[in-house]
Image (tube, helix red, strand yellow):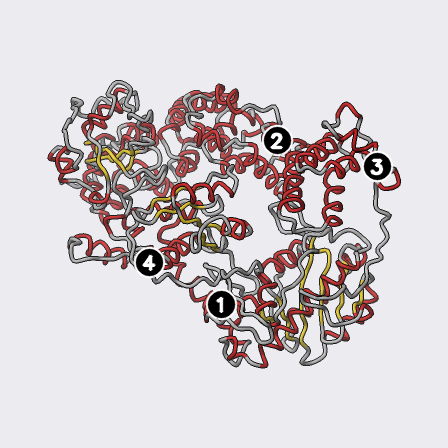
Amino acid sequence: MASFAPEAVGIDPGLLRHQLHELWTAKQLETLHLEAYKGFSNLADPLEALLTILEKCPVKQKGLRHAFGLWIIKEFHQWMKDNPQVTLASLPAEHALALQDQALNMISDIPPNVMENLVNIYQLGSVDATVVLSHINRLQALKYYKEAAVLATKLKLQNELNVEEICTPLILQDNLGLVESFVTGHPQLQEQLVKLLDSWCHPLFSAEDFSMQYPHLCTSKQQLDKIHPKIIAKHVTRLKEKFNIDEALCPNTLNKRRRQTLSFLMFKRFEEKSISEEIWEEHVELIVADDPELHVQLVFMLTKHGNFVEASRWSLRYCIPRDKLPFGVWETQQALQADGRQNDGNNTEEWVPPKPHKFYQFPLTRESVLFIDKPEDLWRCQDAVFKKGSIVGVDMEWQPKFGCISSQNIAVIQLAVLDQVFLLDLCDLNLWKHPGTSCFIRKLFGDQNVLKLGYGMTNDCKCLMATWPEFADDPLIMKGVVDLLNIHQKMQRSGVRGTATGPKEVLVGEGSAEKGLSLLVQQVLGKPLNKTEQLSNWERRPLRTSQIRYAAADAYCLLDVYLALSRDPAHFGLPADLLSISASQSENSRERKQKEKPTKQTHGKAECQGAQAISPSPCGVEKDLLCGEKASVGPALTPQQFRVVCDNMLQGLGRYLRCLGVDVVMLKNTDDHREAAKLAQIEGRIILTCGQPYQSLRSQVGEGRCLSLDCSEKARDQATRVLRYFNVQPTLHDIFSRCQACNNDQYMALPREDMTRMLRQRGFIKDQDTENTEFTSHQEEEEDPGDFLTSSVASEAPRYAPKCRWAPLSVLDLDTLTFPGGASIQLHTVPPGLLPRISVFYICTSCGKVFWEGTHFDRVLTQFQEVLHINDEDSSSDTAAIKGAQQC
């Protein structure tokens, strides 16, 4: 290829584009940069020539991060920095305006991630706002919603646009992050956005009517699920807190959350029966407040659970008119005495509960529990806590905020020493706001000479930062802190079954209803904690006797457990030095995070969607993935034999398992957890869940058919541990053998020529330079991939082909491009720029999603190489792919 002539006065932009593209396709990257700089310098009018080059670029479509056209833009922008004399100001005014207008017209062909370069090169910020707004409206009309929002944001024209028109399509496209960027820095727009989302939570809001306004965006149930009131309410709650917006602007969301909380409390009280009537009433009074509609809703819920007496009492309390009462309540009211409608509110409960005691008992008297609600009383606590060599049990309580996303402000901090327990009342503003209180907490956690015991201190630390924001800016220094959760996990991994003093052996998964700290206390001391008061109203004053006893016992039991473990650590499968467990856990956590950093930097956002990042633990706390369960010793399973249902909290895990060919059904965000049990029973699936639903789901399926995982762990790590636990052995040929979108395992292979024809017929290709290929229907009787594919398709069959089912092209309706199940080929997801380098496209026959081979295959090899099973039948190219992936 001829090089550029330095002495040339000018150069044809088309020739420059052609020569650079030859270097690009030949991948002569070392000389490409220098040749580009030479070419830009030799252009007679570089700014005009750049637009000409971009218009004729063979690859200029959206979403291709390394496309030739995008590279040219970035190189030109860098060249301009070295040649500051090349600016629009050096051109005649009319010519400069024409170039700006031409650049604006190209926005739809430029991915948003390089739009800023185009804006800077052509100084689009100086264009008249009216002209830019007309271009933004044009982008909206052409359905380039993301480009329109990005352009408006970069040129700071948000206040000139309608929030609903800009944001609604982006939300339907699952691009809420861009929506938040659009309104950031504009309080008025933030309020409008929250009010818009809140309007979608109105009881009369109809998703079907809404979809008629955006028919091109609401083509499937999955897209309509994005505006389901349950999902939108979570977004409203988060945005309200993020932008500090008044609750009065989102009444529908607030009302919906209260109704959901009422339903949850009804379940806890009348079905699960896990909270007392007194606690239940406290929360109900707080939730319904003075809302007449919620008063009526409460009465109806009570009658639905068959409790007409309670319904009558509450209806009398709130003076609900007779015409609004459900059937039977008015008649029940007549039999009630007026003085029996409410409690007298007196707390006459005894400090020591009646025998026999089936729970762990707090061993100290009531006088040993000191309630600290004044700053001047802190000295008592300090004198007891800061004794050299002292051991302190630390626990915290906060008001349950049902449906709330963020961390809660702490209501009570419990500090237990051997002869006293101190309850710090942070609901008292004088104590909470006093600088001495936060200084005391900082000093306590940073004192190496004081041993602090806790259980699951990650959440406690988060709530400390929410209570005192200065701890977020200047984090607490943790010294002498032992999280018994780490020790408990060590016990579970060792498989210890016995207890030191208990009458019965206890192990997770063997009939014990206890969990967390209560389970640890039961395993070590023989009796569990009484957790009845856990969900009580901790911000209500005065605290009940049972609340004070619970708070004191929760902190003091940490001392008893630690001392029992220290006396005979070998009995519990622990090393002699218990302090080394937390230290090793923290060190292992740091080492693992350091090892993962290069992978994160390499793959970035390309990792499977739904993989959850782990934020650093402020206390060095880690959690085991499988809640102490032992690995399976059953026969090896193929991914096709392993069928699971993932709870809606584990959708990221489900996507990873599908990547490896596992048959996975994933609950939607709007599904109830109990749907998992129904699917498991009907289809014989194993349930993967986490959190509270585990206990109820496990009881509805057979032994070993329900597994609880830790939601804070990465989905990739969860998948690895699940595969090992059930002895599932995926191979190279299982990768992508299932559609990650719908779980289908049948594909149709489509040659490039046919895909090109389809795109042109549907108007997705307007470039006449593309070779005019005739659409050919390939019809065969057999569904074997080697039989029905053309020669070009067969030679390009994917590495995972042997584990897929293949459909012939004859199943496709050539007029409507739909499959027998009604799914249409998602042609809009195929960038035409891929056509020159992708020979075969693979289409899911169930949902119409289009796939093609790329770098994602190698990323999956890298992420799961430790669980992939390579047989002698695997080709040498596949083995080489793994070796190459290992070097990434």
Alpha carbon distance from label 2 to label 1: 45 Å
Q: Residues within 10 Å of mark 4 (few under 14, many from 20)?
A: many
Alpha carbon distance from label 2 to label 4: 47 Å
Horizontal and vertical percent position of residue 718: 42, 55
Alpha carbon distance from label 4 to label 3: 62 Å
Horizontal and vertical percent position of residue 376: 83, 66
Q: Nearer the viewer, mark 2 or mark 3?
A: 3
Alpha carbon distance from label 4 to label 1: 20 Å
Which residue, given by chain and number where applicable, does mark 3 sit on? 336
Q: Residues within 10 Å of mark 3 (few under 14, many from 20)?
A: some
Three-letter amino acid code of the residue under disc 2: Asp
Query: Is the residue under label 3 in contact with that under label 4 (CB below 8 Å)?
Result: no
Q: Quadrant of residue 790?
A: top left
Which residue, given by chain and number where applicable, does mark 2 sit on? 198
Three-letter amino acid code of the residue under disc 1: Gln
Which residue, given by chain and number where applicable, does mark 1 sit on? 492
In the rendered image, the quadrant that contains the N terminus is top left
Q: Quadrant of residue 842?
A: top left
Is residue 97 visible in this depiction of the protein? no
Rendered position, 1 above or below 149: below
Instruction: Provide the secondary structure element on which disc 2 rests.
Output: helix
Horizontal and vertical percent position of residue 723: 35, 55
